């Protein structure tokens, strides 16, 4: 449509849906590596805020295996994305 009033109404509805889906977000998202010795936490915007490595990590993974940290961060990002998708689906339903 090209009607300015109709466009404004559509934008208003979209903005309300976005605001409701944003309210459903968690404050923190966590992810762990496959061995469960590294945990990464992201804030609501997806920024890394905490990394925890278990004291016995050397018994589980090789010291050169920095991939465990990346795995944990990726898992937290996936959790955040899935939760955002759920919130958006609930709002649009």
Image: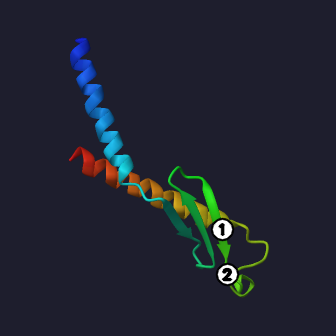
Q: Is residue 1 above or below residue 26?
A: above
Instruction: Kindly identify which residue carries mark 1.
Output: 51
- C-beta proximity under 8 Å, tags 2 and 1: no
Q: Quadrant of the N terminus?
A: top left
> Residue at coordinates 55% horizontally, 52% vertically from top-left?
46
Residue at 43%, 59% in the rendered image: 26
Specify few, some or many for label 1: CA neighbours under 10 Å numbering under 14, 14-19, or 20 or more.
some
Up-down relation of residue 90 to residue 50 (above or below): above
**Residue name at image x 57 percent, y 64 percent:** 41
Real-space Cα separation, disc 2 to disc 1, in angstroms: 10 Å
Pick the residue in front: 57 or 16.
16
| Residue drawn at the location 23% of the way across and 24% of the way down | 9
Query: Is there any visible trace of residue 66 in the rendered image?
Result: yes
59 to the left or right of 89 = right
In the displayed structure, 84 sits above or below 40; it is above
- 45 displayed left or right of 90: right
Give percent across and percent down for residue 61.
Answer: 70, 80
Residue 65: image x %, image y %? 73, 71
Horizontal side of 64 relative to 42 (left or right) equals: right
Q: Is residue 1 visible?
A: no
Find residue 67 and report its horizontal and vertical position in percent.
69, 66
Q: Which secondary structure, mark 1?
A: strand
The residue labelled by disc 2 is 54
Residue 73: give x, y in percent of width and height: 60, 62
Q: Which mark is residue 79?
A: none
Mark 2 residue crowding within 10 angstroms, few (<14) / some (14–19) / many (20+): few
Secondary element under disc 2, as helix, strand or loop, is: loop
Q: How many marks?
A: 2
């Amino acid at each position: 449509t090209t009607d300015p009033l109709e466009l404004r109404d559509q934008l208003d509805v979209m903005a309300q849906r976005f605001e409701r889906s944003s309210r459903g977000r968690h404050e923190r998202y966590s992810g762990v590596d496959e061995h469960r010795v590294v945990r990464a936490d992201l804030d609501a915007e997806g920024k890394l805020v905490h990394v925890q490595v278990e004291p016995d990590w050397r018994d589980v993974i090789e010291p050169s295996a920095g991939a465990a940290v990346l795995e944990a961060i990726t898992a937290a990002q996936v959790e955040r994305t899935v939760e955002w998708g759920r919130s958006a689906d609930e709002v649009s339903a």
